[in-house]
Image: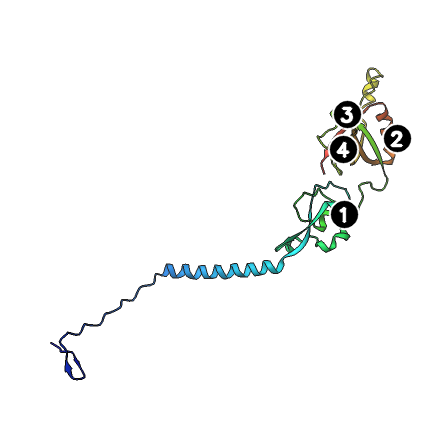
Amino acid sequence: MSVATRNGIPLDAPVAPPKVVRQRRIRPGLLGLAVLLIALGGLGSAFAVTSVRATGSYLAVARPVEVGRQLTADDLVPVRVSGGRELQPVRADRIKEVLGRRAAVRLTPGTLLTPAQLTDAPLLGPGQQQLALGLEPSQVPARKLHPGDKVLLVSTPDTSAGGAEATRAGGTRFEATVIDTATPENDDVVVYLALAVRDVPAVVALAADDRIALVLTEAA
């Protein structure tokens, strides 16, 4: 039996044996999870910094714009977007460069404006003339026609003629493109069309006799 002493003087109390601290085993799964969380945190911080650096002011569409319509300042609104460079939108400081240009496609509110959506080409091409055609609502082939829609003007039979002559009088077709539409107070629909110069006299004569039908062939 051992006796504890202090400076050579025996002590009555026995010396307690030292405690052994057991080492905790680290589970490999938890260690891997911790490393993964640290890595994800670093990536999130890097992405946040990159997004802030890529934030810029761009032009967005403020209201619907039909194909062929010229852009005005009321059609656009500046917005700040993070990481929008990949879409190549038009910067807000270039608004004067796009005003007056035409929409090559239908522009939807809330979307960023890109150069590919704009054009300088008018809907009225070379060798074409504009014609206004008044139709009743039931004669319009769609609930609403849009600029750029492709249509066919088809002549209907002459009811004043009889038999085979009336049949031969109908069925002539003329290709045209919708430029614009309007609805006057009498609820008739006025469709402004671009068609070949050579077809204008025949279409005018058929429209005067109420012998023209409009067929939608391709939506813009």
Residue that label 1 marks: 119
Which residue type does callout 2 highlight?
Answer: Pro
The location of residue 164, given as percent across then percent down, is: 82, 17
- How far apart are the two marked residues, 3 and 2, measured between alpha carbons? 22 Å
In the image, what residue type sits under mark 3? Answer: Glu
Residue 46: percent from left, percent from top: 54, 61
Q: Which residue is mark 4?
A: 151
* Disc 4 element: strand
Tag 4 or tag 2, which sits nearer the N-term?
A: 4
N-terminal of the pair, mark 2 or mark 1, is: 1
Q: Helix or strand or loop: what does disc 1 sit on? A: strand
For disc 2, the marked residue is 201
Q: Residues within 10 Å of mark 2 (few under 14, many from 20)?
A: few
- Height in image: 134 above or below 27? above
> Label 2 to label 1, Cα distance in Å?
30 Å
The numbered mark at residue 22 is: none
Label whose residue precedes the other's in the sequence (3 or 1):
1
Q: Amino acid at mark 1?
A: Thr
Of the two numbered discs 1 and 4 in the rendering, the one whose residue sits closer to the viewer = 1
- Residue type of the residue flagged with mark 4: Val
Give the foreground label among 4 and 3: 3
Say which residue label 3 marks: 136
Q: Nearer the viewer, mark 3 or mark 2?
A: 3
Residue displayed at 71% across by 47% down: 76
